[in-house]
Image: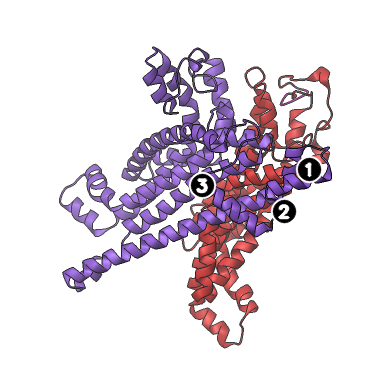
């Protein structure tokens, strides 16, 4: 970017760059809208391909022909498929996701209570794997081919191959049932389950706000295992991708110059290389967050964590179509936004792609 | 894939031991799947409620499950649905992704932009969650699960192929082939495709590790093969009910999933070092 802009008069260069980033932003927003529409269409087609007849669920198996047709008309199912899709889209825009057939509550309010629980889990796992992954990346990049490097490689490969739901069970067996170090499945001990009020939906915050002695430590005990399970797969990925980026920079001239000036490896990595690969780091972390959100689905089921994933799986067993569609859409939209954000981050931080 | 790995020139390359280890493990598991009906020590479906939840012993090497069925036999029989699932995803997703990517990269222009847009959109979808919704709404089973993973899995191949095909399309030897009067499908199939395949292989091996985990996850949630047919993920789910008292019921099927997924990851990492000329 620099060489291009240097050739232009100062004022013009700035104007062009502003216009270019505006175009990019608009294009990104457009793609986001198209992607979400695609997601909507796909989920809606799934529900209309489903062998479960939503009319029969309303009127029961023994309804007369006339009642059936009336209910069908009321549900809007006698309209053409594109029209139904449009109505579905319009309802989604109004944030109306229908009423869950299992909880009897609007799907929107169900999801609003489930979303913070998932975000809390994914965010804590994100923090853990960012800290651990980045430290491992720097340590292994400082001494490539060393013992720690080999160990990280093995750890990362096992983490990538690990079925999360099984690891969760193994950890529960060892640390809860045998050693009693960690809490049972669920968010709090039974003693606190009904005394801690739900304010934010984040168990750590709620436990702290309640002021009940022992509530916070109970919350932490219950969080530790699911966070570990989620973080294990991602930590290795973060470590290896950032390590590769660091090593890619190590042959550059500016590193040689820094070394010639007498800078140590730690100083070169942190002060000279890190700013240059910050885009890669951000991208890796954003991608990791997206995969954590998706990974939370299975982990929540094992740890009885009342988040989006568990809501989705219970809805699946009850064949609760509005709840399935709602949960899929919310997870999907979070995922799509994170992916889009990643692409923006890449082009914002990498001048070659701008 | 395996033949390429085994050709003598590549023996001494750095990734070889890994790739070979992965390939041998996979071959062993495929052999077990093929021979399953003849090597199971017990009938994997035979229930014996007098023998339920027995710990591992000389007779039942891995113990018995909640219905008194021999876990080792179910584990052996369970290789089949897992490998069938994987094969189905490969057959559905790879040719489609490769075709889309090759056309986009080779033709270029407006076609490329359209196909790119489609690829980007589908790439942004959450695979596992959509697969869950898909199997949940359309009914559990091998085919539905594989179909949905294929439906969201092809863009990775399309992206890869597009990048490769663009490079290859401008190369001298494609120009030479064109001068000899080769064009159209024959050029794409016979000259462009073979040059792009090595990196697709690596990507495929890497993906399959994830497909195995996804298949097991669907099975764990009860969205995979119908009971009583044995499937590894569903076996872990059975074991999770008694995990605190009879750990062995869930232990071995989970370890089997880990092993198979690890084998594909090993193969992928090794192949990348041995094979892919465009990597690093």
Are there few (<14), some (14-19), or many (20+) residues within 10 Å of tag 2? some
Name the spot of residue B70 as percent of width and height, x first.
77, 27
Chain hosting mark 3:
A
Name the spot of residue A73 as percent of width and height, x first.
71, 49
Q: Earlier in the sequence, mark 2 or mark 1?
A: 1
Chain the render paints purple: A
Q: Which mark is residue A78?
A: 2
For the C terminus of chain A, the image quarter is bottom left
Q: What is the CA distance from the residue labelled 3 to the residue labelled 2?
A: 22 Å
Q: Which residue is mark 3?
A: A94
Give the residue at x 81% y 31%.
Answer: B41
Q: What is the CA distance from the residue labelled 2 to the residue labelled 1?
A: 14 Å
Q: Residues at badges 3 and 1 in contact (C-beta under 8 Å)?
A: no
Q: Is residue A98 magenta?
A: no
Q: Which residue is mark 1?
A: A67
Q: How many marks?
A: 3
Q: Earlier in the sequence, mark 3 or mark 2?
A: 2
Disc 2, SS = loop
Q: Earlier in the sequence, mark 3 or mark 1?
A: 1
| The colour assigned to chain B within the rendered structure | red
Q: Residues at badges 3 and 2 in contact (C-beta under 8 Å)?
A: no
Left or right: B211, with A18 as reference point: right
Task: Identify the image quadrant of residue A105.
Answer: top right
How would you classify the magenta stretch by its main secondary structure? loop
């Amino acid at each position: 970017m620099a060489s291009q802009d240097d050739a232009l008069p100062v004022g013009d260069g700035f104007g062009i760059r502003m216009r270019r980033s505006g175009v990019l932003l608009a294009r990104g927003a457009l793609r986001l809208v198209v992607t979400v529409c695609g997601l909507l269409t796909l989920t809606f087609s799934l529900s209309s391909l489903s062998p479960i007849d939503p009319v029969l669920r309303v009127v029961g198996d023994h309804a007369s022909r006339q009642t059936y047709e009336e209910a069908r008309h009321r549900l809007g199912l006698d309209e053409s498929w594109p029209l139904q899709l449009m109505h579905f889209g319009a309802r989604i825009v109004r944030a109306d996701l229908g009423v869950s057939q299992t909880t009897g509550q609007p799907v929107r309010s169900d999801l609003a209570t489930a979303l913070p629980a998932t975000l809390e889990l994914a965010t804590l796992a994100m923090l853990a794997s960012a800290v651990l992954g980045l430290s491992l990346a720097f340590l292994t990049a400082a001494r490539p081919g060393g013992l720690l490097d080999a160990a990280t490689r093995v750890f990362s490969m096992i983490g990538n191959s690990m079925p999360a739901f099984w690891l969760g069970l193994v950890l529960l067996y060892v640390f809860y049932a045998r050693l009693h170090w960690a809490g049972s499945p669920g968010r709090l001990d039974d003693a606190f389950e009904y005394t801690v009020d739900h304010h934010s939906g984040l168990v750590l915050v709620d436990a702290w706000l309640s002021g009940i002695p022992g509530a916070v430590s109970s919350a932490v005990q219950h969080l530790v295992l699911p966070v570990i399970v989620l973080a294990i797969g991602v930590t290795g990925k973060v470590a290896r991708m950032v390590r590769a980026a660091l090593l890619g920079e190590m042959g550059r001239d500016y590193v040689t110059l820094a070394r010639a000036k007498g800078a140590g490896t730690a100083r070169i990595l942190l002060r000279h290389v890190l700013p240059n690969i910050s885009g890669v780091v951000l991208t890796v972390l954003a991608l990791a967050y997206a995969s954590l959100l998706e990974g939370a689905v299975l982990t929540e089921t094992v740890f009885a964590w009342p988040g989006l994933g568990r809501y989705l799986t219970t809805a699946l067993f009850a064949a609760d179509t509005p709840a399935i569609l709602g949960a899929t859409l919310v997870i999907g939209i979070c995922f799509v936004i994170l992916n889009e954000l990643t692409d923006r981050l890449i082009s914002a931080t990498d001048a070659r792609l701008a | 894939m395996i033949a390429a790995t085994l050709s003598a020139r590549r023996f001494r390359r750095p990734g070889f031991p890994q790739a070979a280890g992965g390939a041998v493990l996979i071959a062993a598991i495929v052999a077990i799947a093929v021979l399953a009906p003849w090597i199971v020590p017990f009938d994997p479906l035979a229930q014996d409620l007098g023998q339920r939840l027995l710990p591992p012993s000389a007779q039942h090497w891995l113990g018995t499950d909640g219905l008194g069925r021999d876990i080792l036999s179910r584990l052996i029989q369970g290789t089949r649905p897992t490998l069938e699932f994987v094969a189905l995803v490969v057959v559905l997703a790879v040719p489609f992704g490769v075709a889309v990517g090759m056309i986009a990269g080779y033709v270029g222009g407006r076609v490329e932009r359209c196909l790119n847009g489609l690829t980007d959109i589908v790439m942004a979808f959450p695979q596992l969650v959509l697969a869950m919704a898909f199997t949940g709404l359309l009914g559990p089973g091998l085919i539905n699960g594989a179909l949905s993973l294929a439906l969201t899995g092809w863009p990775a191949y399309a992206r890869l192929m597009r990048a490769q095909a663009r490079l290859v399309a401008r190369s001298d030897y494609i120009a030479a082939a064109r001068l000899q009067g080769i064009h159209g499908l024959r050029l794409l199939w016979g000259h462009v495709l073979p040059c792009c395949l090595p990196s697709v292989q690596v990507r495929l091996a890497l993906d399959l590790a994830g497909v195995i985990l996804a298949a097991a996850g669907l099975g764990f949630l009860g969205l995979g093969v119908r009971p009583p047919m044995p499937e590894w993920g569903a076996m872990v789910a059975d074991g999770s009910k008694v995990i605190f008292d009879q750990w062995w019921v869930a232990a071995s099927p989970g370890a089997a999933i880990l092993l198979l997924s690890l084998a594909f990851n090993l193969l992928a990492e090794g192949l990348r070092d041995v094979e892919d000329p465009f990597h690093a």
